[in-house]
């Protein structure tokens, strides 16, 4: 895959006039995330020696919903997935990968709320402590 700037890619995409050309663009200039979110969560859970039930409880998610996310039968919103990742004590890199696999926006250091979340992840804060910090900083909590 040739490394082009976003502006170059937008220009190329702007010149696309057919579905066939779009398919070629997608094949040449994009990539699919490797693996599934549920597989990644299960693998990370095992690597960290964590219990699924404990993680779901620590995340504050409803029990059934948490299990559905882990099994892949239900998708997770960004905040719900972040709560799971924080409960699993994931690193910032692991959180970004989970968000990518879910097709969600990654944490971006220039966004105020995301900066607070990155800090919380880096410090290993709990979901409760993360929500307290978000509230203190005037940002919406993970819901």
Image (cartoon, grey):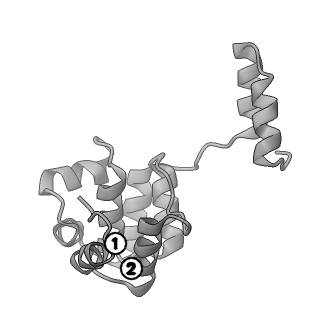
Report helix, strand or loop for mark 2. Answer: helix
Q: Which residue is mark 2?
A: 120
Query: Which mark, residue 67?
Result: none
Residue at x 77%, y 19% (from the top left corner)? 21
The outermost residue toward the bottom is 123
How far is mark 1 from mark 2, CA to CA?
Answer: 8 Å
Q: Residues within 10 Å of mark 2 (few under 14, many from 20)?
A: many
Vertical order, 60 against 130 (above or below)? above
Q: Quadrant of residue 25?
A: top right
Q: Residues within 10 Å of mark 1 (few under 14, many from 20)?
A: many
Vertical order, 16 against 97 (above or below)? above
Report helix, strand or loop for mark 1. Answer: helix
Q: Which residue is mark 1?
A: 86
- Looking at the rendered image, the quarter that the C terminus falls into is bottom left
Mark 1 or mark 2: whose residue is earlier in sequence? 1
In the image, residue 102 lies at what x, y percent? 44, 48
The outermost residue toward the top is 18
In the image, residue 5 lies at what x, y percent? 81, 49
Please state which of residues 15 and 27 is positioned toward the viewer in this rendering. 15
Please state which of residues 68 and 99 is positioned toward the viewer in this rendering. 99
103 with respect to 75 (left or right): right
Q: Quadrant of residue 129?
A: bottom left
């Amino acid at each position: 895959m040739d490394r082009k700037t976003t502006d170059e890619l937008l220009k190329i995409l702007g010149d696309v006039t057919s579905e066939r050309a779009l398919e070629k663009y997608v094949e040449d200039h994009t990539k699919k995330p490797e693996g599934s979110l549920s597989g990644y969560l299960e693998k990370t859970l095992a690597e960290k020696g964590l219990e699924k039930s404990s993680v779901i409880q620590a995340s504050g998610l409803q029990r059934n919903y948490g299990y559905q996310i882990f099994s892949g039968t239900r998708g997770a919103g960004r905040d719900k997935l972040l709560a799971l990742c924080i409960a699993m004590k994931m690193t910032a890199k692991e959180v970004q990968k989970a968000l990518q696999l879910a097709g969600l926006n990654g944490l971006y250091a220039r966004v105020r709320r995301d900066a607070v979340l990155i800090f919380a992840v880096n410090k290993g804060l709990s979901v409760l402590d993360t929500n307290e910090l978000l509230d203190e900083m005037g940002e919406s909590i993970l819901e």
